[in-house]
Amino acid sequence: MIDLTDVHFTYGCHPVLDGISLHVQEGEVVGITGPNGAGKSTLLYVIMGLIKPQSGEVKILGVPVNKFKDWHKIGYVSQKAALFNRSYPATVLEVVISGRAAMRGLFRFLGREDKRRAEEALERVNMLSQRYTPLSELSGGQQQRVMIARALAVQPRILIMDEPTNGVDAANLAGLAQLFKNLHNDGVTMILVSHESEWLSSFASKRVCLDRKICSCSCHYYPDGIRWRDCMNSRQEKISLDCVDSLVRG
Amino acid sequence: MDIFQYDFMLRALVGGLLVGVICPIIGLFVTLRRMSMIADALSHVCLSGVAAGLLMGAQPVLAAAAFALGGSFLLEGLREKYKNYSELSIAIILSAGVAVAAILIGLGNGFNGGIMSYLFGSIVLITVEDIYVIALIGIPVLLLTMFFIKELFAITFDEETALVSGLPVKLINVCFMALTALTIAVSLRIVGILLVSSLMVLPVAVAMQLAKSFRGTLVAAVATGEVAVLVGLMCSFYLDLSPGGAIVMTLVLMLVLVFALTSRRTATA
C-alpha cells in the first residue's frame, strides 16, 4: 500500500529522515513512535506528498507520490484540526461531511449520498447520536472521534493519523484504542504517529521506532538498550557538530 | 412611505441590500480564518483606487476594485513570504494603500472634499452607474462564493487536511482573496472605506452568539447584515446621518442586545 525506499530529508543542515525504508501492507496498522524531533510528522508529510524528500522513493498504492491523484483514497487526521477548532461554529455532521468536499469536486454541492456516508462514518466512531451537536460542546476525546469520522467519510483505503491522542484524556485512550482495533478488524490500513508508545502497542500490528532512522520495532528501547532521552542527547550533539562541520566546509 | 419616493433612496436600498448579503458571507470566512484585519488592509488599498479613479476620470468603484484585486494578490504573495508572521503582510499592504492614497489625494488637491463620501459612504451620491457596477461585480462574487462554499468550509476548518484530500487550496485561497477584495470595493459606496470591514465582521460576531451550526451562523449573519443596512439607511435618511456610521452603529447596538440576551439566557439556565 505504501512503500518508502531510502528516503532522506534535511531541514537546513539538520537531517530529519536519514535513509528511511518502510513498507506498509494492506490491512496493517503501523504505529510510529519516537522522541520529539525524531521526524515522525515529517515522515507523514513525505508520505502524503506535502514535502518532497531530497532523495529516495515514495509510492502510494504502487504510484509515485508526485503522480498520485486518488487522494480520496487516503484519510488524514491532522494533529492541529481538533486543537485549533474547539469553538468552530459547526455541528458534528457539518464537519464530517466536509471531509467529502474534494471527492465531490469543484462546483458540485454535497448531497444525500454524502450525508449518508458521513452518518455511516459517525456510526463507526459511535458519534451518530450527536451529529447535530455543536462541535464546541464536545469533549476533547469526542472531538478527536469526529476528526476520525471526517477522515473515514471518504471510505479511505489508508488512514493516516498524526498524534490522534492530542487532547484526549487518559480515561478515553482505551476507547480510542478499541475504535482503532475495530477499524483494523474492518480491514482499514492505518499509519499512526503517537508519543503514547504503550498505548500504540495495544493495537498496532507493526510498531516502528523512529529517530531520524528507523531504530527498532521495540518501542521502549533502542537496539543497544539506551533509552530515548540518552540517545537523543547524544544525537543532538552529533547533529550540532555535523552542522558546524558542513558550515565550515561551505 | 415617503422614503421610497426618492430615486436616490431606492438606489441606496438596492445597493445596500446586495452588499448586506455579500459582506457577511465573505466576512464569515474571513473571521473564521482569523483574517479580520485583511478587510481593513484591502479597504485602505481601495482608498488609493478611488483616488486614482477620481484623478484619472475613471469610475472610482471600478478603479477601487482593480486596486483591491492587485492588493489581494500582493497580500497573498506576502503571506507566503512571511508564513509565521502573516500579520506583517497586512501591515505592509495597509501602509502602502494609505501612502499611495495620500499622494494621489494630494495630487488631486483633495478632490474638493469628494473623497469624504467614499470614506464614510453617501446615499445621496450613489448613481445608477454605481448600482450597475455593484450588481455587475457583486452578483458574480455572491454566486462564486456559494459555488465554493464546501471548499471554503473545508479549507477554513483545516487547511492541511484539505490539501491532503486533493483540494486546490492555493487556487481557492487566491480566489477567496480576490472575492474579498471585490466585496470591499462594491461595498465602499454604501458604508464607506473606513467602515466596510465592520459590515463584514460585526454581523458574524452577532450570528456566532445566536447560532450553533455553520449554516445557522451563515443565515443569521446575512439576516443581521440586511436588518442593519435597512435600519441604518432609514436612520441616515430621516436623521441626516452618515449611512456608513448609521449602519455600523445599528450593528453595534444589535451586538450589545444579543450579548444582553445571551447572558440573561445563560444566567437563567
Image (spheres, rainbow, N blue to C red):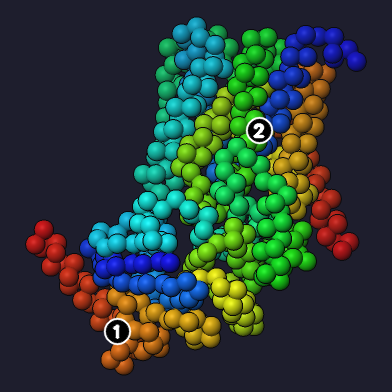
Task: Give the residue drawn at x 88%, y 12%.
Answer: B2
The residue identified by callout 1 is A231
Please name whichever residue, A13 or A106, is drawn nearer the observer in this view of the structure.
A106
Left or right of residue A61, residue B40 in this image: right
Q: Is residue B165 visible?
A: yes
Task: Give the residue drawn at x 48%, y 82%.
Answer: A205
Task: Give the residue drawn at x 52%, y 64%.
Answer: A157
Residue A11 image offset from top left, x and y in percent: 28, 61
Tell me the distance, in whole angstroms, between the alpha carbons under discs 2 and 1.
Answer: 56 Å
User: Which quadrant of the view contains residue A224?
Assistant: bottom left
The chain carrying label 2 is: B
Q: Quadrant of the N terminus of chain B?
A: top right
Residue B228 image offset from top left, x and y in percent: 77, 32
Residue B97 image offset from top left, x and y in percent: 45, 27
Task: Give the residue drawn at x 62%, y 25%.
Answer: B140
The residue identified by callout 2 is B23
Q: Outermost residue toward the left?
A: A249
Left or right of residue A173, residue B58 in this image: left
The verdict on a common chain for dots 2 and 1 is: no
Q: Is residue A248 above or below residue A89?
A: below
Residue B65 image offset from top left, x and y in percent: 53, 22
Q: Are marks 2 and 1 in contact (CB under 8 Å)?
A: no
Q: Which mark is residue A185?
A: none
Q: Secondary structure at mark 1?
A: helix
Q: Outermost residue toward the bottom?
A: A225
